[in-house]
Image (cartoon, grey):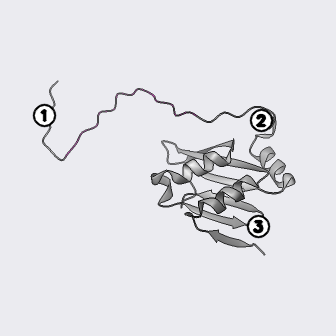
Amino acid sequence: MTAYKTIRKNATKKIQSILNSAVGIIGRVSSMQIDDSYENAYHLATAEEVIAWLKDENNYHDATCFYRDDEFNVSGPYHFCDHFTAYFNQEALNEALECYGLAESIDAPQEPLEAVRVESNVIAVDFTRRVRLSA
């Protein structure tokens, strides 16, 4: 039988203490492909990264925090949203690290991920007023 318990997302002190007591945290970031499929990228996360993600108002509105079995999860409402899983059992963490291909990164120092900006030729048009385009 699966145990499921919801934690209020505004209980930041409780969430912080839960994350601090975890053996490890794995984060998943999904990106949409042109054919509507999703590609997942897994990384080792920190408690500070999870709290920062939760405090972002774009994420906070739809965020969910819950225990399922022996894992604590913080995520968005859909399967393709960012997702963080905190593990409290070292064996379960090692199994997840192997499953997601992160076993070799345990000893490597982790640095926070930086946003990457790529220049593009996309034109944004504001349709609330008339726009005249000239060639």
What type is the residue that disc 3 sits on?
Asp
Few, some or many residues within 10 Å of mark 3 (<14, 14–19, 20+): few
Q: Which residue is found at the position 74% from the left and 45% from the top?
A: 100
Which dot marks residue 69?
3
Is residue 32 or residue 109 the one in the foreground?
A: 109
Q: CA distance from mark 1 to mark 3?
A: 58 Å
Q: Which residue is found at the position 61% from the left and 45% from the top?
A: 49
What type is the residue that disc 1 sits on?
Arg
Residue 38: x %, y % from top left: 56, 47
Few, some or many residues within 10 Å of mark 2 (<14, 14–19, 20+): few
| Disc nearer the start of the sequence (1/2) | 2
Residue 134 falls left or right of residue 14: left
Which dot marks residue 30?
none
Residue 39: x %, y % from top left: 59, 44
- First to last magenta residue range: 114-127
Is residue 102 or residue 70 the one in the foreground?
A: 70
Residue 4 falls left or right of residue 60: right
Does any portion of residue 28 appear in the rendered image? no
- The residue pinned by badge 1 equals 132
| Disc nearer the start of the sequence (1/3) | 3
Residue 52: x %, y % from top left: 56, 48
- The residue pinned by badge 2 equals 105
Q: Label 3, secondary structure: give it.
A: loop
Label 3–label 2 contact, CB within 8 A: no
Residue 89 falls left or right of residue 114: right
